[in-house]
Image: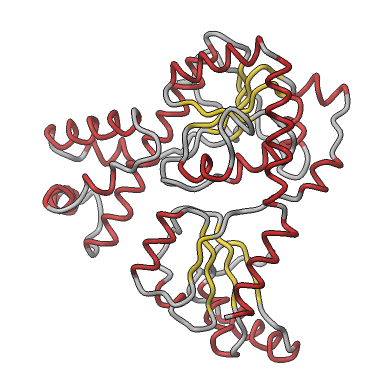
Amino acid sequence: MYQFDVIQEDAYFDRNFEKVLRKGAYDGVISWNFWPLVAEVCHRVGVPYIAWVYDCPIAYDIRQWAMYPTSHVFIFDKNEYEKYRQMGLPHVYHHQLAVNISRLESLIPTDADEARLGNEVSFLGSMYDSLFEDLSAALSAYKVGFLDALVSSQQCIYGADLIKPILSGKIIEEIQLELENNGTIQPCDADTFSEWFCRMVSKKVSRSDRIMILSELGRRFHVKYFSYQEYPEIQGAVYSGPLSYNEDMFKMFKVSKINLNITARQIPKGISLRALDIMGAGGFLLSNWQEELVENFEPGVDFVCYESIQDAVEKCEYYLEHEDERKEIAKNGHEAVKRFDYSIQLKKVLDTVFSV
């Protein structure tokens, strides 16, 4: 895989990618996530560029390149999609992510896989390290208290973003000014700071969500978490290292009795790829309430959702004791997620681009 010097400028890639496109007479170019350099060259050559985005939010400002008539951006979270529509981008679409059902069905765990990966409750994901603590340490006591209260409030609410609406106007201006004046951050424009700071707060909430839920469940059940590093703050759950995305992750989803999806708070409404992957593998999904998840799958039939930490504990206890119901829901979820197979989702993407 080619690594850009920087995502907006790479003379070698620019020159050689343009040669490839001009020689090949391609109908279009498709990528995961949005790459400004790819968009720039496609615009210059006049080739449609399709960016299917799995990050939320997109980590940098794409407006300059997404305004090109050749750029087509597919975004899985409704909030993120609406944000870019309001910016006036000509070709931005709301479109869910996908799974490769036939490949996942072909992965058959061995007895050794089950002994290594099986468990009562499992979670795979990062704890979202954030600069929140460092930023808080540089703020006044009043603002630290304000932010702590915001984090606590957001943790109690699923399906609604409190962070961006509350961190607006005078309060975000004061936070930016204070951090710039004491040298914690470099000066930048207000919109850029607001996006960045809200993302730091969201990551703090995501980290707290995951640590608290895994610790609470770990005190009652056999819980494993798979991640690139161990987190001492998680009490009771067993750190089990990282897993390869191609095979081991999906085998773990198959052999775990309950698979947790704790959606990152940076995704206000959308269905995370983890949730689709769990159902695609035929695993039982226990997820936080998420607007687009309950719009596309039936809670209690295709998956189970929780609305609080205590609710997650009670549902884990119930479904560990009711194996037949748990297996039936996992089976239903696997059938339902077939509507998100790549053969269907990719066709929708291509039909959208080449019919406009």
Above or below 39: residue 255: above
Residue 182 x %, y %: 16, 48
The residue that appears at 51% across and 13% down in the rendered structure is 314
Above or below 208: residue 350: below
Residue 329 x %, y %: 68, 28
The residue that appears at 42% across and 63% down in the rendered structure is 60
Residue 189 x %, y %: 23, 65
The residue that appears at 40% across and 77% down in the rendered structure is 64
Query: Is 90 positioned to the left or the right of 105 in the image?
Result: left
Query: Is 143 positioned to the left or the right of 76 in the image?
Result: left
Front one among 131 and 82:
82
For the N terminus, give its image quadrant.
bottom right
Front one among 141 and 31:
31
Q: Quadrant of residue 224?
A: top right
Front one among 211 and 139:
211
For the C terminus, give its image quadrant.
bottom right
Query: Is 91 positioned to the left or the right of 193 in the image?
Result: right
Residue 80 x %, y %: 42, 57
Q: Quadrant of residue 348?
A: bottom right
Above or below 14: residue 93: above
Q: How many marks?
A: 0
